[in-house]
Amino acid sequence: MFLSLTSEISTTSWILSFLAAFVIGMSKAGIKGIAIINVTFMAIAFEAKQSTGIVLPLLVIADIFAVIYYNRHTQWKYVAKFLPWMILGIILGSLVGMDLPEKAFKIFMSIIIFFTVGFIVWWDQKKTKTVPTHWAFSSGVGTLAGFTTMVGNLAGPISNIYFLAMRLPKNHFIGTAAWLFLIINVFKLPFHFFIWETISKETLLLDLKLIPGIMLGFIVGIKVVKMINEEFFRKMILILTALGAIIILFK
């Protein structure tokens, strides 16, 4: 059952929603890998499908904050490589995502994330500075990221893998991801409005009340990112991405 009035939301759901908004703000400020937490909180507070429509406008708002703050660091060539394949994945997800068995999806996602995290750890130990240049890498990862972002707002772990593989410095990583996800999340809005019908006046009213949580999380996230050096940032993303895969599997 979808929301009818925000007054019907329980206190527990309000708390979980605010925490989710706070985590979204921190994630978009650069603490990548924790976005799965907001997905989990929202899925607990509301029905899984309904929660995707609540989360999406919050992501767009947080993306705008991130673009404004990190715009000067954007590396557009990586956006150009990744974006078309993410759009393809979104279209595929909109067509088949409604009927996809949730358990099978979670297992598949977790296996892919664990495999790619393990690959990058092995790659880092080789101390090689080369990055994947074959079109199959960007197309495969991009399509998977688009599919997962449409089905469950779970593109974060997959896109993290791509940007880590490209060896982007911290601020370039955050700035490039900011523009990529603003474009993608705006592109997803019509699908949620008109096909899945998970966004309504009521969900948007709820989102408006959660904006302070995003702003607070973004401010805290910026302060934390400034204290993190490049090497630790890379390790942090890998660890949080792997933890995200575990949460996806068992949530």
Image: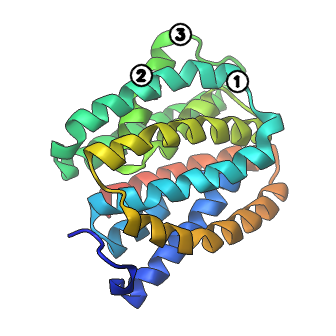
Badge 3 amino acid: His
Q: Observer-nearest residue: 163 or 94?
A: 94
Q: Residue at x 59, y 41 (%)?
A: 182
The disc placed on residue 134 is 3
Q: Residue 140: which numbered mark, if any?
A: 2
The N terminus is located in which quarter?
A: bottom left
Q: Position of residue 6 (x, y in %)?
A: 39, 79
**Where does residue 53 sit, x and y in percent of width and height?**
38, 57
Q: Earlier in the sequence, mark 1 or mark 3?
A: 1
Q: Amino acid at mark 1?
A: Trp
Q: Position of residue 18 (x, y in %)?
A: 53, 76
Which residue is depicted at the point 64% across and 38% down?
Answer: 177
Q: Nearer the viewer, mark 1 or mark 2?
A: 1
Is residue 54 visible to the viewer in this orientation of the structure? yes
Q: Which label's residue is closer to the chain start, 3 or 2?
A: 3
**Residue topped by disc 1:** 76
Q: Secondary structure at mark 1?
A: helix
* Point 51% across, 45% down: residue: 156
Q: Residue furthest front?
A: 201
Q: How many badges with numbers are in the image?
A: 3
**In this picture, is 181 found above or below 226?**
above
